[in-house]
Image (tube, helix red, strand yellow):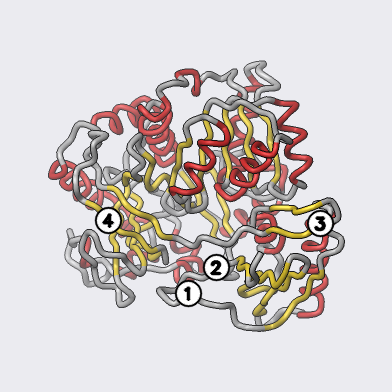
C-alpha cells in the first residue's frame, strides 16, 4: 500500500469533508479493495483466512475476526516479513524505548483490559499521518474550538492525565511530542499527570502549571471538575479534550460548566485509531472515509440505522502493517444517517459503551471522590488475572471479584492486587477503607456482553 506524507494526509482528509455520502461509500470500497489485496499478499493469517474468496470480495463476504484469534497469530498477522514477535516483546518490556520507533519505522501501542488478552499494535507512518490529519482537520480546526486558534501552537501549555508506565497509545504520543519539542529547545510547556496520583497532588500540580489545554479520561476530568467547583482547583483552561472512555452528555456539560470552556471528544481505539470526533452540534461523527463501522446484533447480523447494536465490526483502512478488517468490538452503538446541522457529510453515532460508577468514599477528612480508572489501571496488568470487577459495598468497603488464569499462582496474584489497591487507597487518604478479594463471576449487564468494571452497590 502506498505511503502518505503528513501534507498528503491532511489534503485527503480535508477533501473528504466536501464529498457526498455516495462518494464516501465509493472511496471506502476503493480503499477496502486495496487493503484486502495487500493483506492477502503479505499477511499469512489473512491469506489463509480469505482462501476460497473471489479476487475482489465484498465487505460482507469477508469473515469477521476477533481479538483472541488475531493475538494468537501475531507473527502471521503482521505484513512486514522482517517482523519478529520476540523482538517486539523485548521492545515493549524496555521502558527506555518509549517514544522510539520499533524497527526504526513503527510506533507501538499496547492495551490491557479486563480479558487477560493484551493487544499489541504497530502503526506505520501511513496510519500515524492520517490519524494526525483527522485530529487536525476535524477536531483542532473545527468550529467547536474556534475560540482557541492557538491550540496547535507548540508553546501552548498542555497537561495530560494519562495511564502511565507502559506503551499505551496516549502516553507514548505524549512522550514523543515532548521529546520533539525539547529537540527544538521548547521546554516547560507539557505536564504529565498519572491517573494513579492522589487527587490532591493532581490539584496542586495543575494549580502550579496553569494549563491552557487539558486531555484525559472523562471520569478523571469529572473528578477534577468537582475539585474546581469546590475551589481547591483554580485553573482557567481554554480547551478540554476527552478520549478513551464514553463521554456522556451529562458529563460533558458538567465539565464545560465547571471550567467555562469547550469540551472536545474523540472515540478512539488502539486497533482502529480515531473512530469518531465530536462536532460543534454535540454529535460524534464517524471518520468513515478511513474507518468502516458496521453495527451488528448478537448473532453478527447487521442492524439498521436508529437501532441499538450489540457490537460493531470495525475496519481500519489506514494501517498496512497490521490490518484490522471486520474486527469485532463489543460496543453498543446507534448509527444515524440523517444529515447534521454542522455540515459534515459523515454519519454520526450514539456510543453506548460501558459507563462505570464513580467511586466516593468516606475518608478521615471528608468525602473523597475518585475515577474508577484509578483502580482499573492499578490491577489490569497483573499477570494471572483473567477478568475482574470492583464492587463498592459501602462508603468504607470495597471488594474485587476476580477470575484467575488457570496457570496462575492465586496467592501471589492476590498479594499483588492487595498491594496495588492499598497503594491507591492510602495515597488518597483512605487508610480506613476495608478492601477484600473474592473469586466470583462479575455482574453482567442485562443487555449485550458489556459489564461495568466498577459498581457502587449502596445508597449514599
Query: Given contact means CB atoms under 8 Å apart, are the residues at marks 1 and 3 in contact?
Result: no
Q: Which residue is identified by label 4?
A: 335
In this view of the protein, which residue sits in the foreground, 395 or 406? 395
Per the image, label 4 sits on a secondary structure element best described as strand
Q: Which residue is identified by label 2?
A: 452
**Mark 2, mark 3: which one is toward the viewer?**
3
Classify 10 Å Cα crowding around label 1: few (below 14), some (14-19), many (20 and above): few
**Left or right of 345 in this view: 48:** right
Gap between marks 1 and 3, in whole Å?
30 Å
**Left or right of 83 in this view: 143:** left
Q: Earlier in the sequence, mark 2 or mark 3?
A: 3
Image-quadrant location for residue 57: bottom left
Q: Earlier in the sequence, mark 2 or mark 1?
A: 1
**Left or right of 218 in this view: 373:** right
Q: Residue 280 got which mark?
A: none
x 52%, y 36%: residue: 257
**Mark 4, mark 3: which one is toward the viewer?**
3
Gap between marks 4 and 3, in whole Å?
43 Å
Query: Given contact means CB atoms under 8 Å apart, are the residues at marks 2 and 1 in contact?
Result: yes
Q: Which residue is identified by label 1?
A: 445
Per the image, label 2 sits on a secondary structure element best described as loop
**Left or right of 344 in this view: 266:** right
Q: Which residue is identified by label 3?
A: 363
In this view of the protein, which residue sits in the foreground, 239 or 413? 239
Q: Position of residue 279 (x, y in %)?
A: 35, 37
Q: Where the N terminus falls, by quadrant?
A: top left
x 74%, y 45%: residue: 199
Q: Position of residue 156 (x, y in %)?
A: 58, 20
Query: Given contact means CB atoms under 8 Å apart, are the residues at marks 4 and 2 in contact?
Result: no
- Above-or-below relation of 173 to 378: above
Gap between marks 4 and 2, in whole Å?
23 Å
Amino acid at each position: 500500500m502506498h505511503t502518505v506524507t503528513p501534507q498528503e494526509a491532511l489534503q485527503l482528509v480535508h477533501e473528504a469533508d466536501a464529498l457526498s455520502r455516495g462518494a464516501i461509500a465509493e472511496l471506502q470500497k476503493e480503499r477496502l479493495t486495496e487493503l484486502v489485496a495487500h493483506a492477502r499478499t503479505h499477511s499469512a493469517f489473512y491469506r489463509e483466512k480469505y482462501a476460497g474468496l473471489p479476487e475482489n470480495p465484498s465487505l460482507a463476504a469477508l469473515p469477521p475476526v476477533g481479538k483472541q484469534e488475531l493475538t494468537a497469530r501475531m507473527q502471521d498477522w503482521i505484513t512486514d516479513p522482517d517482523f519478529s514477535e520476540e523482538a517486539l516483546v523485548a521492545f515493549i518490556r524496555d521502558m527506555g524505548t518509549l517514544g522510539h520507533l520499533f524497527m526504526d519505522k513503527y510506533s507501538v501501542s499496547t492495551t490491557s483490559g479486563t480479558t487477560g488478552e493484551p493487544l499489541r499494535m504497530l502503526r506505520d507512518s501511513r496510519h500515524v499521518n492520517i490519524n494526525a490529519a483527522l485530529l487536525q482537520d476535524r477536531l483542532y480546526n473545527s468550529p467547536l474550538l474556534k475560540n482557541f486558534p492557538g491550540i496547535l501552537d507548540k508553546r501552548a501549555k498542555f497537561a495530560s492525565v494519562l495511564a502511565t508506565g507502559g506503551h499505551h497509545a496516549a502516553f507514548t504520543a505524549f512522550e514523543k511530542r515532548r521529546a520533539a519539542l525539547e529537540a527544538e529547545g521548547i521546554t516547560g510547556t507539557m505536564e504529565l499527570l498519572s491517573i494513579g496520583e492522589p487527587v490532591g497532588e493532581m490539584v496542586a500540580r495543575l494549580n502550579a502549571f496553569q494549563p491552557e489545554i487539558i486531555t484525559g479520561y472523562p471520569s478523571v476530568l469529572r473528578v477534577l471538575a468537582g475539585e474546581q467547583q469546590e475551589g481547591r482547583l483554580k485553573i482557567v483552561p481554554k480547551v478540554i479534550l476527552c478520549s478513551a472512555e464514553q463521554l456522556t452528555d451529562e458529563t460533558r456539560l458538567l465539565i464545560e460548566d465547571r471550567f467555562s470552556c469547550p469540551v472536545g471528544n474523540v472515540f478512539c481505539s488502539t486497533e482502529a485509531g480515531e473512530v469518531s470526533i465530536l462536532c460543534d452540534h454535540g454529535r460524534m461523527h464517524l471518520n468513515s472515509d478511513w474507518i468502516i463501522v458496521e453495527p451488528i446484533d448478537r448473532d453478527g447480523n447487521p442492524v439498521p440505522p436508529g437501532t441499538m447494536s450489540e457490537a460493531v465490526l470495525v475496519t481500519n483502512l489506514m494501517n498496512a502493517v497490521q490490518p484490522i478488517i471486520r474486527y469485532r468490538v463489543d460496543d453498543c452503538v446507534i448509527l444515524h444517517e440523517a444529515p447534521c446541522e454542522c455540515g459534515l457529510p459523515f454519519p454520526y453515532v450514539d456510543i453506548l459503551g460501558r459507563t462505570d460508577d464513580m467511586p466516593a468514599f468516606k475518608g478521615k477528612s471528608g468525602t473523597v471522590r475518585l475515577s474508577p480508572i484509578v483502580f482499573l489501571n492499578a490491577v489490569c496488568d497483573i499477570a494471572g488475572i483473567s477478568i475482574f470487577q470492583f464492587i463498592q459495598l459501602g462508603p468504607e468497603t470495597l471488594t474485587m471479584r476476580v477470575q484467575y488464569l488457570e496457570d496462575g499462582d492465586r496467592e501471589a496474584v492476590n498479594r499483588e492486587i492487595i498491594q496495588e489497591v492499598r497503594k491507591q487507597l492510602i495515597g488518597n487518604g483512605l487508610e480506613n477503607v476495608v478492601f477484600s478479594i473474592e473469586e466470583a463471576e462479575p455482574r453482567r449487564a442485562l443487555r449485550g456482553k458489556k459489564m461495568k468494571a466498577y459498581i457502587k452497590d449502596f445508597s449514599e
